[in-house]
Image: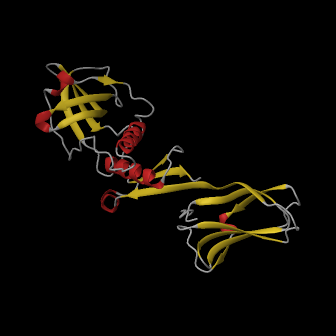
Amino acid sequence: MDLDLDLRSCDLYKAWIRATGAVKIRLVTSSGNYFEYLKEPLESGEWTPISAELRSFNVVGKPDWNHINYVQLVFSRVDVGQDIYVDEQHFKGRVFYEASDANSIRTYGSRVLVYQDYSIASSDEARLIAEALLQEYKDPVKRVSFVIEGDETLDPGYLVELSHPAFKVTGHYRMVEIDHTIADRFETRVICEKAPPNLPRVIAELRELQEKERGRWTGLSNVERLRETSGTLDDIPDGVTHKKPTSEERKVRGGRIIVLMKRCI
């Protein structure tokens, strides 16, 4: 059987075996190239749990954890007429995919965001989610500023939805600086940063895309990217709304490397 398993980030082999004598468990890449673990003695006629760390397997030839094509069980000293049973054979552990942007790291430094989701079912899914999130985080935060009629109720952290076609400003921004001025009249100057993507929404949209395209992932590009847009947008206040940020929306922006974890089965 050609399994072509990638076990690089798994850490355990587990199974239940009912037999006598001993068993060698081989994780085979090709003929003569395998990882091997010896379990002895097996409890005669009883179910024996097997839990072996992959790092404890001996290396024979030149096997590759990235390409395990079949599992071979070699029994010895089995009683004559003894039946052999194997059940619940599987691998356990976590695998990850890391996406990074060398130019961003070189220019702005390295920051790490770890996103764990045990519902991710494949390495391809982890890769494309990581790459989609990286596109949202790898560049500097975009800022806009505007002046409105004085409003002492505003606080840093509020979200505003801005729309200004002339400046190509659209979407959700977070208030990061608020400056009140009292002269001829009471005015408030607001500086906003482009709000980070909502991670659950990104995941949901990517999965929806996967379903529509039958497993062919293409990444997410719904959020229009702004290139260092700034300026005083006097007519923005007419369309400004704000609300308190949720716990999910408070996630820090600016990660340079995105890492996603997934379960290995």
In the rendered view, tell whether residue 234 sits above or below residue 141: above
Rendering quarter of residue 236: top left
In the rendered view, tell whether residue 1 sits above or below residue 96: below
Rendering quarter of residue 9: bottom right
* Residue for point 39% across, 51% down: 128
Q: Is residue 132 left or right of residue 262?
A: left
Rendering quarter of residue 61: bottom right
* Residue for point 19% across, 30% down: 163
Specify whether residue 39 is in view. no
Percent position of residue 262, x then y: 53, 50
Q: Nearer the viewer, residue 37 or 190?
A: 37
Q: Nearer the viewer, residue 139 or 261?
A: 261
Percent position of residue 74, x then y: 74, 70
Q: Is residue 49 left or right of residue 159?
A: right
Q: Nearer the viewer, residue 206 or 23?
A: 23
* Residue for point 27% across, 40% down: 223
Q: Residue furthest left?
A: 166
Specify whether residue 192 is in view. yes
Percent position of residue 190, x then y: 24, 30
Look at the image and name its color scheme. Answer: secondary structure
- Looking at the image, how many numbered discs can be counted on the residues? 0
Percent position of residue 138, x then y: 33, 52
Please identify the quadrant where the N terminus is shown.
bottom right
Q: Nearer the viewer, residue 185 or 259?
A: 259
